[in-house]
Amino acid sequence: MAIHSTSNSKNNDIAASKPTDKVTKLEKNTSSLTLEDQLSFDLITEQTTLREQRAGKNSRGLLILVNGMENSGKGEAVKALTEWMDARYIKVHATMGQHPSRYQPIWQRHTWQLPRKGEIAVYFGNWYADLIRYVFDCGDDIDEQRLQQMIEDIEAFEQDLVNNNTDIVKCWFSVDNKTLKKRLTDEEPDPEQLYHLDWFRKKDVKRFKRFSSRLMGLQSSWHHIDGQDIDASNIQFANVVLAALQTMNQLAAADDAQDNPQKSDKQKADKSANPKTDKNPVKPNPLPFKPTPLIDELVSVDNQALEKADYKKQLHSKQHILAELIRERGQRHIIFVFEGMDAAGKGGAIRRIIAPLDPREFTIHAISAPTEDELKHAYLWRFWTRLPHDEMADVDIVYLSQKFKRNKCVALLKQRLHNSRVTIFDRSWYGRVLVERIEGFAKEADWQRAYGEINRFENDLVQSNAIVVKFWLAISEEEELKRFKAREETPNKQFKITDDDWRNRAKWHEYVQAASDMIHLTHHKKRPWYVIATDDKYTARLKILDAIISELSKNL
């Protein structure tokens, strides 16, 4: 979503509103200060409105991406912005460009810097610095297909942020070669800055400008900031931010009006006093959702039992194979997702998976209701930040090879430092299209849109060489009731049964339909769903191990 400023390098609207009669010499000398004071007032007003809305469910956050040439006025513009606004409520982050890893999405390492709803974050470098680093590291050997894919992944990620109430403003600062040369001579900066390139080299500057032109052509959402005149660029940048704040506050107000029809009369009355509200964007109602056909296994659950002795024999054999396969994963991350009916045996299945593994090889995330802080971020944020992080980039290996001069030593360091993991989610991002959908915790438009967001998210994981396997554990309604009662009667298992479990059970058929929709709309051969439909725990565990062995054998 591009938020474009209607202002030029100076605030024309503000300037036009000033008196047109005779201006004194003193006024002429202080006219720029008056302009800045008015701009500051408008910025703080919108910033205050944003903060006042942060407790509402329609509140929004603002992410300001700052990129461009070194010595083009980026730092000065952000410094001016923090002076004109309340700096206490603006978070400024900066990252150095890092060669993108082949084992995680390009945006993943940056998810911790995303603003909460009601907050403003300025982010220097960001994922575009990584993109530029890739271009310069590869040089003439660049993989154009991979570069294009990373750009598309970034665009999809940014759109998902916007859809989840995190608006994005992207500003690109530039100066001409003459100004750059003068500022480099005057200030003598470190030639390796955000993008790790030498700004004293004409070849590097030319390549940077060539790629920036290409990026601007592909993404119309960028605001170009001319850094020749620092004062003018500061005002232009601030006006871009102001326009974004005004737009997002209007969006939040429009969403509140839709959610609270009782307030609409007052808002209609306000429109006469504030004509701008007539232009408030209104989101259309979602299209009618068509349920998918029920999956047979979800309604016809197998009840044949396996003998315990036979189960143990098969279990040990399959666990041995599983352990061997996982140790062959190299640098690839493996992600298992477990969903299913309450008391279907997810915990028991997970224990049999991790039993033959080294505890250092895996991480388990038991997902419950989101915390207050998690609710202030985009829906998928709490899962993005739980993914295994790959901090061992290819460029670091180059550095180590130069430092140690021994290929064997480098290989060992690479293996140790690479944080490849087996990550298991007991409940996951599918909560939005399951419990949040059924219990009314998410708006209809939000859970319908979530299918596309989930598919894009998982596709990014797969394209980053992760192996993703998903399980839905189905049991019969009668078997669930039996297990619920057993938990209530067993002291060390009573914690497993809650009022929520009984509430969910009352909506059994709704959950079956939601599960069918979920599986139909998010299944893919590279990130498949396996439906494990049996009332026998032994059989379920073995089927899960079989599925994992099959997927790992195909992909490793």
Image (spheres, rainbow, N blue to C red):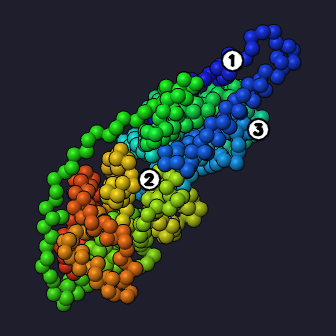
In this figure, what is the number of numbered marks?
Answer: 3
Q: Secondary structure at mark 1?
A: helix
Amino acid carrying label 1: it is Ser
Give the side of residue 137 with respect to residue 532, left or right. Answer: right
Amino acid carrying label 2: it is Tyr
Mark 2 or mark 3: whose residue is earlier in sequence: 3
213 or 77, which lies in front?
77
Give the side of residue 79 with respect to residue 389, left or right. Answer: right
Q: Secondary structure at mark 3?
A: helix
Quarter of the picture holding the C terminus:
bottom left
Give the side of residue 30 with respect to residue 142, left or right. Answer: right
Amino acid carrying label 3: it is Glu
Residue at horizontal 24 percent and vertical 82 percent from the top: 315
- Residue depth check, mark 1 versus mark 2: number of the one nearer the observer: 1
Spatial CA span between label 2 and label 3? 44 Å
516 or 67, which lies in front?
516
Spatial CA span between label 1 and label 3? 39 Å
> Does residue 519 appear in this view?
no
Spatial CA span between label 1 and label 2? 42 Å
